[in-house]
Amino acid sequence: MLQHENLDSDSKEYRRAKFAILIAFLINGFSVGNFVSRIPDFKIELGISNGVLGGALFCASAGVLTALRPTSKSAARFGSGPVVKYSAFTLSLAVPLVGLLFNLEWFLFSLFLYGALSSIHDLSINAHAAALENLAGKRVMSTFHAMWSIGGLTGGTLGGLLATAGITIRIHAFIVGLIIFLIALATRNWFLPAAADKHPIEKREKHKVPRKFLILGLLGLCGALGEGAASDWGGVLARDSYDASPFISALPFIFFSFTMVVGRLSGDFLAHKFGAVRLLTWSGLVAGIGLTGGVLIGNIYGIILGWFLLGIGLSTIIPMMISATGTLANEKYSGRVSAAEGVALVTGVAYFGFVIGPPLMGFVADLITLRWAMLIPALLAIIFGLSAKKVLS
């Protein structure tokens, strides 16, 4: 049950909290963008195959999944604000650990740790964003996720430039960790108080998970797998299949992130104008058909085009799912499921796409090449588009 009064969207507290959450989404995306930009270099430096790289990326995804449940409970018990504040500092420490890259075993361990700590920060900022939406009665989730994409775009661009300049992965990772630490330090006291979404958890209470949350999660899974595939494999495909330079290899992710930004900045407006169901239907079809077309073209320009259209289509999926979850928890299951727990349930199912995506793509790539393996997320996006109306109506 919420213990905090409603917020006026013109108040200083609302504006400060909104800005803090925007910055939190930015640094989370920034860390991921920088990481993704160096994936081809991780592969080259360690001398591993696509299948082994997929298994390594699975460790990061497993870390994400491992952290979801304890994070949701902590956000509900203590409020999402404190979890956001402290997890930003741990994220700044996790990034340099991956960059050390001592050997394959260290890479696997550091990826698991990075995935877990990144997930704690990711989940808590989404729960905090849902709390702000609920208290202010204003849809802003897509804008927050646009900020994540801006962070990803900025991080990917920076990473591509540093890779081209020959900056080592270790120095790069240290720079990113320091930037995140300084931003976390500056914004630590700007979030909503813990009471904004603190939700008491009774140990004796055991409720069956509402089916609606699971359905929303499955819908989000289609988008998550496509988003993960675009992030993890675009650079590898460009480098291995089309002999692209380090910077050109980063362009598919950069273009993907750019269209994700544009789509998410427009998402709240488009959802109001055309309705969430129609928007998500077309989003899935644009993503799936666009990626398929890019793969069939069969050159670096096709890959860039495919990632460009995939970003447009996928941009609204995850924020819409999370926003719908927060609304559902607060309106239909208030007192039974907190917004933080609801978000965790949905993201736990959706983020399973990030868990199965990397090893699945790596395994299939070793069988039929990475180019044709990319038709898997394309097909899932089309399935999402065709089923959105039935699920959300």
Image (tube, rainbow, N blue to C red):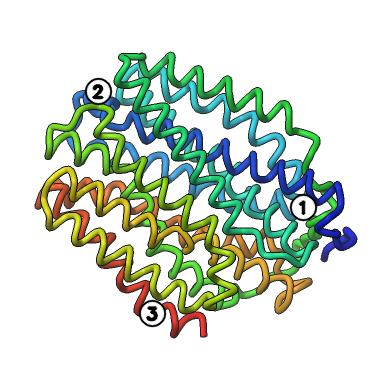
Which residue lies at the image location 57% right of the left edge and 46% below the top edge?
Answer: 122
Q: Earlier in the sequence, mark 2 or mark 3?
A: 2
Residue 3 vs residue 265, the one in the foreground: 265
Which quadrant of the structure image shows residue 271? bottom right
Q: Could you tell me which secondary element the residue under label 3 belongs to?
A: helix
Disc 2 from disc 3: Cα separation: 41 Å
Residue 164: percent from the left, percent from the top?
A: 29, 20
Circle 1 packing at 10 Å, graded few (<14), some (14-19), many (20+), is: some
Which residue lies at the image location 50% right of the left edge and 60% below the top edge?
Answer: 318
Q: Could you tell me which secondary element the residue under label 2 belongs to?
A: helix
Which residue lies at the image location 40% right of the left edge and 60% below the top edge?
Answer: 314
Residue 327 vs residue 304, the one in the foreground: 304
Residue with the mark numbered 2: 46
Tell us which disc is closer to us: 2 or 3.
Answer: 3
Left or right for 247, reference 78: left
- State the quadrant of the N terminus: bottom right
Tell us which disc is closer to us: 3 or 1.
Answer: 3
Left or right for 154, reference 1: left
Disc 3 from disc 1: Cα separation: 35 Å
Label total for image: 3
| Res 387 label | 3
Left or right for 217, reference 50: right
- The amino acid type found where label 3 is placed reads Ser
Tell us which disc is closer to us: 1 or 2.
Answer: 2
Residue with the mark numbered 1: 77
Circle 2 packing at 10 Å, graded few (<14), some (14-19), many (20+), is: some
Residue 61 vs residue 219, the one in the foreground: 219
Residue 188: percent from the left, percent from the top?
A: 75, 33
| Image height of 138 relative to 250, above or below | below
Residue 353: percent from the left, percent from the top?
A: 39, 57
- The amino acid type found where label 2 is placed reads Leu
